[in-house]
Image (cartoon, rainbow, N blue to C red):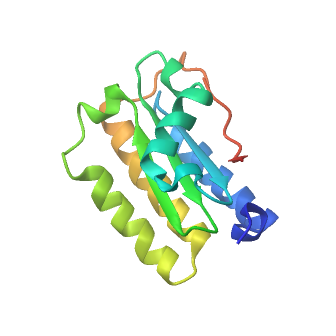
Amino acid sequence: MTPEAFLSPADEQEVVKAIRAAESATSGEIRVHIERRVPGGDPVMRAQELFIELGMGATALRNGVLIYVAAEDHKFAICGDKGIDDVVEDDFWDCTKDAMQAEFRRGNFKQGLIDGISRAGERLRHYFPGTHDDTNELPNEISNG
């Protein structure tokens, strides 16, 4: 499955809308990156590489979250920066992955992403509430590899 087949253009717009909504009340940043295959086979390592490549570690409060998907390999990972990792529950990312995977298994890729984005957004809002002078530090669009 190619990244383009993973989400339709309309689905992609709904995911971007979910990112904007999740970020609306937080200083945190959420990005989604979709590619065909995971180089080297390890989605966590690839997510960590992309986290750096996409500038996710450059947020002022180190509160970026990357959701990485290798569509054809049926693999994905979530990578949170130090600021968010230090405050969420130890099993938060695993529970988020479980919720996403339940939708992915049903073929609901858009909903799986939206669920993950929403869960991350809830935690970001709790620990990193938005302020009147927040700026969007990173693009909201889905990146592809």
**Residue 96 in picture, x, y percent from top left:** 35, 58
**Residue 41 in picture, x, y percent from top left:** 50, 56
Given residues 6 and 84, the one toward you in this image is 6
Q: Is residue 81 above or below residue 119?
A: above
Q: How many marks?
A: 0
Q: Is residue 48 above or below residue 14?
A: above
Which residue sits at x=67%, y=50%? 16
Q: Is residue 20 visible?
A: yes
Q: Is residue 29 above or below residue 132?
A: below
**Residue 55 in picture, x, y percent from top left:** 59, 24
**Residue 128 in picture, x, y percent from top left:** 36, 29
Q: Is 36 displayed left or right of 40 in the figure?
A: right
What is the residue that sits farthest to the front in this orientation? Answer: 40
Which residue sits at x=41%, y=47%? 120
Residue 2 occupies which quadrant of the picture? bottom right
Which residue sits at x=54%, y=20%? 134
Q: Is 129 displayed left or right of 12 in the figure?
A: left
What is the residue that sits farthest to the bottom in this orientation? Answer: 106
Q: Is 35 displayed left or right of 65 in the figure?
A: right
Q: Is residue 121 visible?
A: no
Q: Is 67 displayed left or right of 85 in the figure?
A: right
Which residue sits at x=47%, y=62%? 115
Given residues 62 and 73, the one toward you in this image is 73
The quarter in which the N terminus is drawn is bottom right
Given residues 42 and 6, the one toward you in this image is 42
